[in-house]
């Protein structure tokens, strides 16, 4: 089964935190890892993905400072995801849609997550995007408060991966 290496320059994770006032987005670009995939055997796909949490960008220096302090990236620098299963595989032309499940580890906690997504796979490149939600309290994170504004416990996540064949 071919192995694809994630391109950290073009891949990204976008997390949207909701509050009663407005949503805030944080973007991570430090994504690395490998994906073993074959379009004929999608259910046998294996993946291990790491996110360098220090690459978080909330859009301005004040938000970045607050998020780094609240999330303690120095103490917890890497979040890791390991794929357990791909299901509900649907093919349409050159595109594949599926549901994936796996284990996300960060801050000494491990939780199960399920994402839906789609992508394309060639001999040279894998392109994939997906979305999922996480209750941050399950990872030991208390949502921040700014004055009297509280951020919701559940955040929406969108990931875009580009991986190149080795």
Image (tube, grey):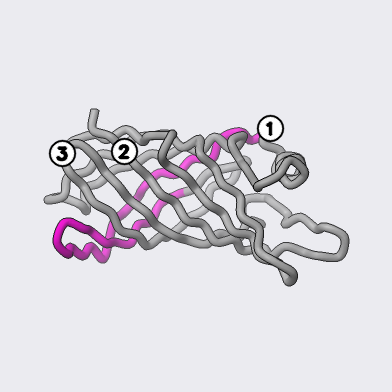
The part of the chain drawn in magenta is: 74-103
Q: Secondary structure at mark 3?
A: loop
Instruction: Looking at the picture, tell me which residue is in the foreground, 99 or 159.
Output: 159
Q: Which residue is mark 1?
A: 75
Q: Is residue 79 magenta?
A: yes
Tell which of 52 and 41 is nearer to you.
52
Which of the numbered marks, if any, corresponds to residue 163?
A: 2
Residue 108, given in percent of the width and then of the height, sits at 61, 41
Q: Is residue 43 above or below residue 56?
A: below
Quadrant, the N terminus: top left
Left/right of residue 41 with respect to residue 26 in the rendered view? left
The residue drawn where x is 54% and y is 40% is 79
Left or right: where 95 falls relative to 116: left
Q: Which residue sits at x=32%, y=33%?
A: 5
| Percent coordinates x, y for residue 44 in the rendering | 21, 48
Answer above or below: position of 32 versus 149. above
Residue 89 is inside the magenta segment: yes
Nearest to N terminus: mark 2 or mark 3: 3
Q: Which mark is residue 123?
A: 3
- Magenta: main secondary structure equals strand
- Of 55 and 144, nearer the camera is 55
Q: Is residue 33 above or below residue 16?
A: above
Q: Residues within 10 Å of mark 1 (few under 14, many from 20)?
A: few
Classify residue 8 by image quadrant.
top left
Mark 1: which secondary structure?
loop
Of badges 3 and 1, nearer the viewer stands 3
How many angstroms separate mark 2 from mark 1 (CA)? 28 Å
Q: Earlier in the sequence, mark 3 or mark 1?
A: 1
* N-term-proximal mark, 2 vs 1: 1
Q: From the viewer's perspective, is 159 left or right of 153? A: left
């Amino acid at each position: 089964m071919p192995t694809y290496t994630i391109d950290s320059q073009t891949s990204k994770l976008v997390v949207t935190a909701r509050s009663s006032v407005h949503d805030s987005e944080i973007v991570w670009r430090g994504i690395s890892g490998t994906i073993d995939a074959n379009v004929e055997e999608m259910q046998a796909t294996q993946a291990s993905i790491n996110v360098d949490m220090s690459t978080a960008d909330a859009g301005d220096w004040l938000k970045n400072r607050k998020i780094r302090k609240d999330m303690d990236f120095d103490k917890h620098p890497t979040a890791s995801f390991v794929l357990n299963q791909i299901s509900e595989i649907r093919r349409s032309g050159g595109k594949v849609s599926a549901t994936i499940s796996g284990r996300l580890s960060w801050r000494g906690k491990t939780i199960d997550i399920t994402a839906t997504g789609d992508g394309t796979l060639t001999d040279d490149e894998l392109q994939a995007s997906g979305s999922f939600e996480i209750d941050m309290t399950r990872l030991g994170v208390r949502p921040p408060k700014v004055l009297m504004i509280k951020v919701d416990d559940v955040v929406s996540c969108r990931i875009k991966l580009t991986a190149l064949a080795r």
